[in-house]
């Protein structure tokens, strides 16, 4: 009788008490060419746009938290999920809200990079704006997020690299004159005294995160709620390229993929590739774009019927889809 009571007690504990793990598995997927709750995921104003067909789905990893031991074991036994220590996603000392905020910041950064990469790929005119101020920024009180930086001294700037080059002759502690425009106001000159760069004391540091923005009168918008992290950058860039160029980039195919992207269009690795491929195939994707650094892992776990395409840059991704559309064979994963 005692043994039965102990067994019942252990079963009850395993059913109710949360396990110190999270379950990772296939998460939601969204068509970046479509709409979510009536709002286009990607849109453009002040630029010509063109009809699109097919899908360009971004993929995610689902995280299930607060699960009981028995449920965790059941999810693991299904073969679809992987268990990970809870602290690996929610570090000790950080609240769930802090982790969510950090993920949102990464997501916002991926949007800025996706827009910059698309503008660069399409060779469209660009401006340099202030994306954010760093903590303790020497530009605080002078610059604000959204300000357009038009010149450093007498040197005009129209790209982030141009801004960095123009700041190359500046020195910490010596005031720099910037030509700035805020909103609809006329351009004005302001002085900022740069600090020493945290990574190189000899370099001048404005304490801003510069962003590449479209020309005046033009606007790119990427809207997708309840998603965090940087891994949708590639698919956002492709959606912008598709909408801003004639002819459907997908050729009507159901394409899904993943990958971070930087402002220069370089595609970076991500985590959870297996889960993302599983979800993509489940919803009908025929082709999956894989960051070059994830290719070996992806080839080992690719679902049947899902064609893997290796990409290292936005240019390569656009080229691969064009190759598919013309009946060619783009680089795969092996």
Image (tube, rainbow, N blue to C red):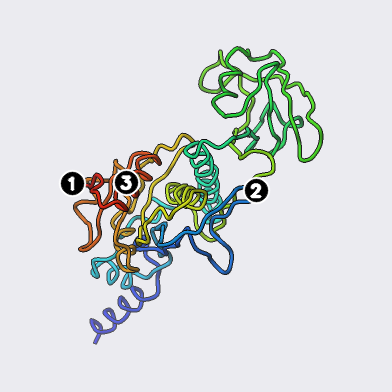
Marks 3 and 1: in contact by CB < 8 Å? no
Identity of the residue drawn at 39% across and 69% down = 67
Relative side of 325 to 30, left or right: left
Q: Where is residue 68 in the image (x, y as percent from the top left)?
A: 37, 70
Relative side of 176 to 209, left or right: right
Of marks 2 and 1, the one in the foreground: 2
Give the vertical position of 96 relative to 153 (above or below).
Answer: below
The numbered mark at residue 320 is 3
Location of mark 1 (residue): 334
- Marks 1 and 3, Cα distance to the nearest angstrom? 16 Å
Identity of the residue drawn at 23% across and 47% down = 332
The numbered mark at residue 221 is none
Of marks 1 and 3, the one in the foreground: 3
Regarding mark 1 in the picture, which secondary structure is present there? Answer: loop
Location of mark 2 (residue): 46
* Residue placed most toward the observer, 85 or 282: 282
Q: Quadrant of residue 170?
A: top right
Crowding near pointer 2: few (<14 within 10 Å), some, many (20+)? few
Identity of the residue drawn at 76% across and 29% down = 142
Regarding mark 2 in the picture, which secondary structure is present there? Answer: loop
Q: Where is residue 141 in the image (x, y as percent from the top left)?
A: 76, 32
Identity of the residue drawn at 66% across and 18% down = 155
Disc 2 or 1, which lies upstream in sequence? Answer: 2
Q: Position of residue 276 (x, y in %)?
A: 34, 58
- Marks 3 and 2, Cα distance to the nearest angstrom? 28 Å
């Amino acid at each position: 009788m005692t043994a039965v009571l102990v067994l019942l007690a252990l079963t009850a504990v395993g059913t109710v008490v949360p396990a110190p793990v999270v379950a990772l598995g296939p998460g939601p997927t969204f068509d970046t060419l479509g709409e979510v709750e009536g709002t286009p995921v990607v849109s453009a104003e002040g630029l010509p746009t063109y009809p699109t067909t097919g899908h360009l789905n971004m993929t995610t990893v689902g995280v299930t938290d607060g699960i009981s031991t028995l449920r965790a074991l059941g999810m693991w036994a299904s073969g679809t999920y992987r268990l990970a220590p809870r602290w690996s996603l929610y570090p000790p000392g950080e609240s769930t809200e802090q982790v969510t905020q950090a993920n949102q910041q990464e997501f916002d950064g991926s949007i800025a990079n996706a827009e910059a990469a698309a503008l660069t790929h399409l060779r469209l005119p660009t401006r340099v704006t202030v994306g954010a101020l760093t903590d303790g920024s020497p530009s605080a009180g002078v610059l604000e997020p959204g300000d357009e930086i038009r010149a450093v001294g007498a040197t005009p700037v129209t790209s982030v690299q141009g801004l960095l080059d123009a700041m190359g002759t500046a020195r910490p502690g010596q005031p720099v004159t910037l030509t700035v425009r805020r909103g609809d106001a006329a351009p004005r000159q302001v002085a900022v005294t740069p600090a020493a760069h945290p990574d190189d004391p000899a370099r001048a540091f404005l304490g801003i995160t510069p962003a590449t923005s479209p020309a005046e009168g033009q606007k790119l918008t990427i809207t997708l709620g309840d998603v965090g992290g940087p891994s949708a950058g590639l698919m956002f860039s492709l959606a912008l390229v598709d909408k801003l160029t004639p002819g459907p980039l997908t050729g009507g195919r159901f394409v899904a993929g993943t990958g971070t992207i930087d402002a220069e269009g370089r595609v970076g690795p991500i985590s959870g590739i297996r889960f993302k491929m599983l979800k993509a195939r489940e919803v009908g994707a025929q082709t999956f774009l894989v960051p070059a650094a994830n290719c070996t892992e992806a080839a080992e776990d690719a679902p049947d019927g899902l064609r893997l395409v290796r990409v290292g840059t936005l240019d390569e991704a656009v080229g691969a889809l064009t190759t598919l559309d013309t009946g060619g064979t783009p680089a795969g994963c092996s």
